[in-house]
């Protein structure tokens, strides 16, 4: 996958799927367990959520 397909943060993920941040955070468990989202470590142990656009597109198609 191309680096431009990487979505970083709940805001970008929600915008990509056309839902609110609160809605997509509600699916955190299934998305994480399915390998559709992952966390990257930043400085000082902080982490940020990331996802590949193609993986989210696939997950979204299965949900509808």
Image (tube, rainbow, N blue to C red):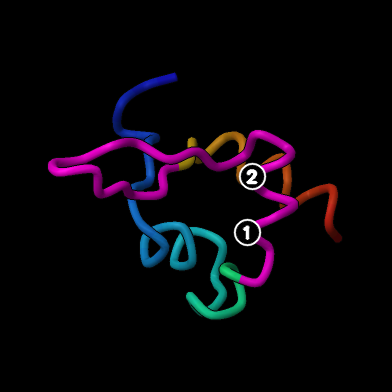
As helix, strand or loop, the secondary structure at mark 1 comes to: helix
> Any magenta on residue 49?
yes
Q: Kindly check if marks 2 and 1 are in contact, taking CB atoms under 8 A apart as contact.
A: yes
State how far apart marks 2 and 1 are (Cα).
6 Å
Which portion, as a residue range, is magenta? 26-50
Q: Which mark is residue 32?
A: 2
Q: Residues within 10 Å of mark 1 (few under 14, many from 20)?
A: some
Task: Look at the image and tell me in which quarter the N terminus lies.
Answer: top left
Quarter occupied by residue 45: top left
Image-based side of 8 in relation to 13, left or right: left
Residue located 73% across and 45% down the image: 59
> Element type at marker 2?
helix
Residue 22, magenta (yes or no):
no
Foreground residue, 53 or 37?
A: 37
Q: Is residue 56 left or right of residue 59?
A: left
Residue 55 position, x and y percent, is: 61, 36
Estimate the x, y position of residue 30 in percent, counting from the top left: 75, 52
The answer to whether residue 60 is left or right of residue 2 is: right
The x, y position of residue 7, in whole percent, is 38, 45
View extreme (top): residue: 1
Q: Position of residue 57 (x, y in %)?
A: 64, 44
Q: Which residue does the numbered mark 1 point to in the structure image?
A: 28
């Amino acid at each position: 996958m191309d680096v431009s397909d990487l979505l970083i943060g709940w805001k970008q993920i929600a915008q990509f799927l056309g839902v609110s941040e609160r809605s997509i955070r509600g699916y955190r468990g299934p998305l994480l367990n399915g390998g559709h989202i992952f966390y990257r470590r930043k400085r000082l142990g902080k982490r940020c959520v990331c996802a590949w656009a193609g993986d989210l597109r696939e997950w979204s198609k299965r949900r509808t």
